[in-house]
Image (cartoon, helix red, strand yellow):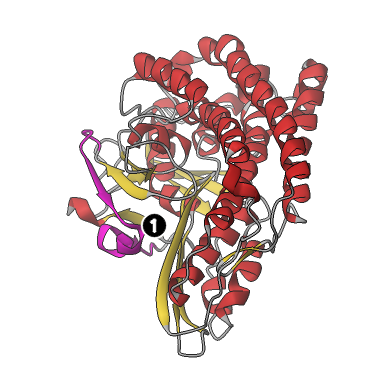
Amino acid sequence: MTQVITIHPVTRIEGNARIHIQLDAAGEVRDAQVRISSLRGFEQFVVGMPAEEIPRIVTRICGICPWMHHLAAVKAVDACFGVQPPPAGHLLRELCQVLAHIHDKILHFFFLGAPDFVIRPDADYSVRNIMGLVQQQPELAARVVRMRQLGQMMLEQLAGKAIHPVAAVTGGFARPLADSLRKSLYHDAQKLLDFAVFALEFAKKKVFSQFLEVFASVGAVTTGFLGTVDVYGNLRLYSGTLRMMHPDGHMKEFEPSAYEQMLAEEAVAWSTAKIVYARSWDEGLSLDPVSPKGVYRVNTLARINVCDQIATPRAQAELEEFRSRFGRPAQHSLLYHWARLIELVYACERVLELLEDERITDQTVRNHATPRAGRGVGHVEAPRGTLIHDYTTDENGCITRANLIVGTTHNIAPMNVSVRQTAASCIQAGKVDDEILNRIEMAVRAYDP
């Protein structure tokens, strides 16, 4: 006889998922699967549409990170039409993207991840949530809400809309940045940086230091990593070269347009979402938690593993401390939370850098684009990982083919490996309680799917 344990829904994630755990007759874990509801319909919805409309359509893919789809799409359409934005256009796009990272990271860490640590993973589920955090730390919760709102309002002032944006247009940006608004945004960005530094120090002293043994046991797997770097090996979120790190630490870089040579997509019977694996390792795909093959990870932990350094001072200092503790590459899945806060500091510093660049207020923010037949691949680093939009257009500039690989799709394979490892280490002789089930969920939450 076998038993199936179902965790549904997986709580405190930005979407819908369930976990199926199969036990053998002895009550030991035989298999475990993370099943995510995923509709790839947008790849068909956009066929036949004028390409310049696509960046406004694909923002509906995700209400949490519409800016990432907006920008990856517009970069792909730029490439289809053979146009490059002027410097101010690129800077304004990156400013919007990095601002969107800030409020997203605040949301995930404090609203979704932190209750496991601030409230404790063994606490009753009725209080192990954001409302429990509000009751236990009301001043902290109020500050978190204010800072996340500030990030959203800055986006709205800059681009007109914080959600489902329309500001990035083919060839550049919709409008220039006034100097008065630049100064106002700079003032607010300093507040966000102060909060980011506080948040990381708070987490290191009162959260992470108390749960290092949990970090070593929940989702403890060994995989490769994928992220974006510039020509100097610095962490990048808006543009750059993709870098794949093998589990043994050796790395290979490739252009986003060559992603199909490096990555393969595979359908599995138990998921509506495709699984992506590293074709370049020539090992195929195996989700065995002991020795996974072809499995790599994206998102915050991946990005700070693949980069050589971070080009902003406070984030670089935090990266050095992180590596002195956990090495490179760091493999523990729960370290995603630590890496997420390092990236929060970087994003705030990068916003200040962008606003200090004199070119950002230049009045020329868009170059003329002519629809034509072509193919373009656009990519950015979304909060949940590397995001790829791939479009082909006909002679009228209408879409004939579309392929998207979103951050969570890259992480489906490693999430399954992490859940199998966590379930196997926690469930013995069929004994299951609420704390065990929550630890299995924690292995998923770390990836912020």
| Farthest residue, direction bottom | 395
Q: Is residue 264 magenta?
A: yes
Residue nearest the observer in this picture, 95 or 153: 95
Q: Relative to residue 144, is residue 375 drawn left or right?
A: left
Q: Is residue 332 above or below residue 392?
A: above
Q: Which residue is mark 1?
A: 275
Question: Could you tell me if residue 156 is visible in this image?
Answer: yes
Residue at 61% of width from left, 33% of height from top? 352
Q: x, y (%) of residue 257?
A: 34, 63
Residue nearest the observer in this picture, 284 or 260: 260
Q: x, y (%) of residue 138?
A: 82, 19
Q: Which residues are magenta?
A: 247-268
Q: Is residue 183 magenta?
A: no
Q: x, y (%) of residue 410?
A: 41, 51
Q: Relative to residue 400, is residue 188 drawn left or right?
A: right
Amino acid at circle 1: Ile
What is the quadrant of residue 210 in the picture?
top right
Q: Relative to residue 295, is residue 197 drawn left or right?
A: right
Residue at 69% of width from left, 32% of height from top? 189
Residue at 45% of width from left, 62% of height from top? 378
Is the N terminus in the top left, top right, bottom left or bottom right quadrant?
Answer: top left
Residue nearest the observer in this picture, 298 or 409: 298
Are there few (<14), some (14-19), or many (20+) residues within 10 Å of tag 1?
many
